[in-house]
Image (tube, rainbow, N blue to C red):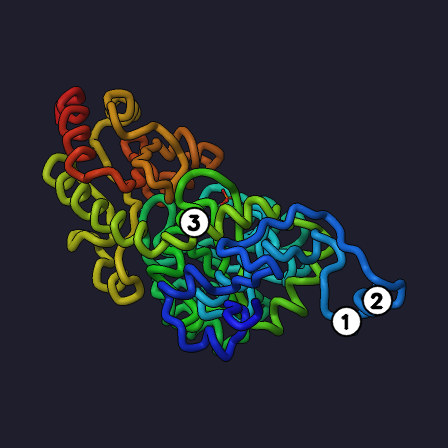
Amino acid sequence: MKRKSGQNPEITKNWKPATLAIRGGTARTEYGETSEALFLSSGYCYDRAEDAAARFAGEQQGMTYSRLQNPTVEMLEQRIALLEGAEACRATATGMAAMTAALLCQLSAGDHVVAAKAAFGSCRWLVDTLLPKFGIATTTIDGSDVAAWEAAAQPNTKVFFFETPANPTMDVVDIAAVCAIARARGITTVVDNAFASPALQRPMEFGADVVAYSATKMMDGQGRVLAGAICGSRDWIDNVLLPFHRNTGPTLSAFNAWVVLKGLETLDLRIRRQSENALKVAQFLETRLPKVLYPGLESHPQHALAMQQMDAAGPIFSLYVGGGRAEAHGLLNALELVDISNNIGDSRSLMTHPASTTHFGMAEEARLEVGITEDMLRLNVGLEDPDDVIADFDQALKTIGR
Ligand SMILES: *Cc1c(COP(=O)(O)O)cnc(C)c1O
C-alpha cells in the first residue's frame, strides 16, 4: 500500500490543489483502507527496548507518544502543508493554540511585536495583554497602511503579526509589501489566514514566513470540531516551533484531525460556492443598507488588492444597518433562516453582533477605532441557495424599516 502514498514527494510534487486536498498526506495501513485510518492511541509499543531508545534518540523513525506524533494527525499536517506550499506543518487543538504557539515559541522578554489593530478578539488579547505580561512589547497599527509597518519597526522587533481579510472589519493587508519590509529587517511574519484558507490565499507565495490557521473555520467547514495549524519552513517548524509544541502540548486530537481531513476534501468546492453566494447576498444588502464591507465588492476600498491576493473573496463580510444595537439585534432576531451564531466558515449562514459577542472583551474605544460599531453585524454566508438567504434578509430588513 506504499505505492499510492500521498506522502511521497516524488508523486505529490506534480499534483494540483484539488488532488492534494483529497490525497495529500494519505498513508495507508496494510488493510488498504480507502479513507484515512483514525488512530485513537495515546502511546506506541516497541519490539525491543533498544528500539525505544533509538526512537527517543531520534535515530529511528516512528511514533513515541501522541502528544508528539500520531499517524492521523500527521496525515492532516502533511495535507495542509501541501495545500499551503509549505515545507512543514504542525497541527494544534484550536486556532488560538496555533496563534499562541506561533508567537510564544519565537519570542523572549525584551522583544517587540508589531500587529495589525483589526484582528480576531483573542488575537488582540494575545498582543495587548499576554505578550506584555512576559516583557514582550507590542505596537498595534492600521495594518492596511503599509508605511505604518515600516514606521513601527524597532531594532528589537522580532515579529509582524496580521490577518487578512481581518475579523470583522474586512481590512486587507498587502501581504507582499509588508513581508518585504519584514524580510529586509530580519523580522518573521506570522499571517493568520483563517478567513481565506489555502484554497483562496497562500501568503507564502507573497513572502510570509509562518502561516497559522483556525482549522475550525473553513477547513472543517461544517461546524463540527475545533482545530488549528501552523505552517513554516522545515527548519523553523523543527527548531523553533517543535521544542515549544512538544513540551507545552497544544496537540490536536486524532479524532478532530480525521474530521478536518474529511473537511479538506471539499474545501475548494465549498469556499468557491460560498464566495459566489456571499457576493450575491452582499450585492443585495448593499442596495438596502448604508454600508457593506466585503472585499469582493467594488465598493470595498481595497477591492483591487484583495483580488490580487485572493482567488475569491470568501464567505464572510460585515454590514452596517444604521442606528445602534437595537436595530442590529432587531435584524438578528427577525431572521428565520440565518442563525444567530458567532462561528464562521460553516456551511450554514450565520450572523453575529461583534460588539456584544466576539469583540465584547475589547475596550469600547479600541472597538470604535477599528470600526466595530453598535450597528455592525458580521455574516458568514453558507451553502444554502443564496436566493433563500436573500429572501430571509428581505423580510427581516423590513421589520427594522430598511
Ligand atoms: C476563529 C479565529 C481564530 C481562533 O480560532 P479557534 O479555532 O476558535 O481557536 C483566530 N483567528 C481568526 C481570524 C479566527 O477567525
Residue 226 rendering spot, x and y as whole percentages: 52, 42
Could you tell me which secondary element the residue under label 3 belongs to?
Answer: helix
Residue 201 rendering spot, x and y as whole percentages: 36, 62
Q: Which residue is disc 2 drawn over?
A: 51
* Residue found at x 87% / y 64%: 48
Q: Are marks 3 and 1 in contact (CB under 8 Å)?
A: no
Of the numbered discs in the image, which one, if any, rests on residue 176?
Answer: none
Q: Nearer the viewer, residue 172 or 236?
A: 236
How far separated are the C-alphas under marks 3 and 1?
32 Å
Could you tell me which secondary element the residue under label 2 belongs to?
Answer: helix
Q: Are marks 2 and 3 in contact (CB under 8 Å)?
A: no
How far separated are the C-alphas under marks 1 and 2?
7 Å
Residue 1, located in which quarter of the rendered image? Answer: bottom right
Q: Are marks 1 and 2 in contact (CB under 8 Å)?
A: yes
Pick whichever of labels 1 and 2 is earlier in the sequence. 2
Q: Which residue is disc 1 drawn over?
A: 60
Could you tell me which secondary element the residue under label 1 belongs to?
Answer: loop
Amino acid at circle 3: Gly
Amino acid at circle 1: Gln
Residue 189 can be seen in this image: no
Q: Which residue is disc 3 drawn over?
A: 263
* Residue found at x 41% / y 60%: 21
* Residue found at x 19% / y 48%: 279
* Residue 196 vertical placement versus 354 (above, below): below
* Residue 169 vertical placement versus 312 (above, below): above
* Residue 103 vertical placement versus 118 (above, below): below
How far separated are the C-alphas under marks 2 and 3?
36 Å
